[in-house]
Image (cartoon, grey):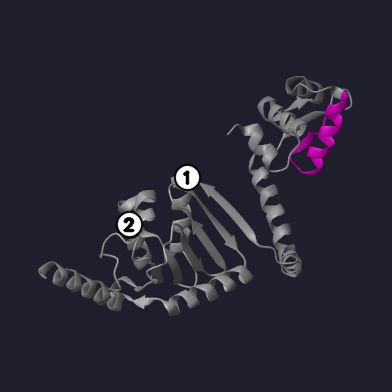
Amino acid sequence: MPIDRVLMDIGLHETEVRFYLAALELGQAPIRDIARKAGISRTNAYDVFSRLLTQRLVNEIPQSTDRSMLIMAESPERVLEIVEERRQKLAAVMPELLSLHNRAPAKPKVRYYEGPDGIKAVLDETVACRSKMLLGILSMSDLYEVPGRAWMDDNVRRRIEAGVTLRVVRSPTRDVHPYWSDNPADLRILRYAPDDFSFSMTTYIYDDKVALISSRKENFAMTIESPEFAAMQTGLFETLWAASRPAAAASAKRAGRGKIIDLHRKT
């Protein structure tokens, strides 16, 4: 980033930056020479010099009465001192600022993301949840399309390494393989929704947030940070959880259906 842009970003006006940089290059010089090099009028240069003098970024060199006033720029390290002084002033009033923020009416924060990269960003955020507990309603077949199995397997690995437990409800009709099973070692507690439930979207609930991830067709993700909304979604999740079958029971049911099919084939 250009030097002048950086100096303006920390609060100096454009003409102050031009004057200061010109003074740095010239060393000790009359104000008219600095104004000429900085590309500002001599009248304006006196006003700029006065402001920089207040900030102790320039200094006046005493001269005899028959010579023009000479100006010298202070060391660039003075710029760092200005930044630190401003930081200390802000830190001093930060408790009061935070108290004002805490009294502000609570508003939900909604963030919208498009495409595979946005979906990955939201999934990464779930791994970093503070509560270490995720509630999930997952469409496995859709997650295997976007962001894909390899990426999702790595996301699961990172969730386990972070010590985040997942209570998850999945649709038996949209499951894809048995590897993400009910497994204490993987910090996963799995249930299967009733057969007539089919999810085309994935939902995660954690902390005070709800994350929604679409199928490839709409290709978006969003997070809603709201204690009330998260509490409502948690209640709906618990209702679905209670109506869902533990993974072992669902497997036994599927196995039973397989036996019935075999018997029909034999008869």
Question: Which residue appears farthest toward the left when viewing the image?
Answer: 266
Query: Magenta stretch containing residue 60, yes or no?
Result: yes
**Nearer-N-terminus badge (1/2):** 1
Marks 1 and 2 sit apart, C-alpha to C-alpha, by 19 Å
Query: Magenta stretch containing residue 28, yes or no?
Result: no
Looking at the picture, how far across and down is residue 109, in whole percent? 63, 59
Q: Residue at x 28, y 77 (%)?
A: 248
Q: Secondary structure at mark 2?
A: helix
User: Which marked residue is nearer to the observer: mark 1 or mark 2?
Assistant: 1
Left or right: 171, with 17 as reference point: left
Looking at the picture, how far across and down is residue 200, in whole percent? 44, 57
Left or right: 258, with 61 as reference point: left
Q: Disc number at residue 161? A: none
Can residue 172 be seen from the camera position used here?
Answer: yes
Judge whether 8 appears above or below 256 on screen. Answer: above
The answer to which quarter of the image holds residue 167 is bottom left
Q: Residue at x 48, y 64 (%)?
A: 204
Q: Which residue is mark 1?
A: 115
Left or right: 173, with 25 as reference point: left
Can residue 164 be seen from the camera position used here?
Answer: no
Q: Quadrant of the N terminus?
A: top right
Question: What's the amino acid at mark 2?
Answer: Asp
Q: Residue at x 43, y 47 (%)?
A: 216
Q: Which residues are magenta?
A: 43-63
Q: Which residue is mark 2?
A: 154
Q: Secondary structure at mark 1?
A: helix
Question: What's the amino acid at mark 1?
Answer: Gly
Judge whether 17 appears above or below 30 on screen. Answer: below
Mark 2 Cα shell of 10 Å, populated few (<14), some (14-19), many (≥20): few
Mark 1 Cα shell of 10 Å, populated few (<14), some (14-19), many (≥20): some
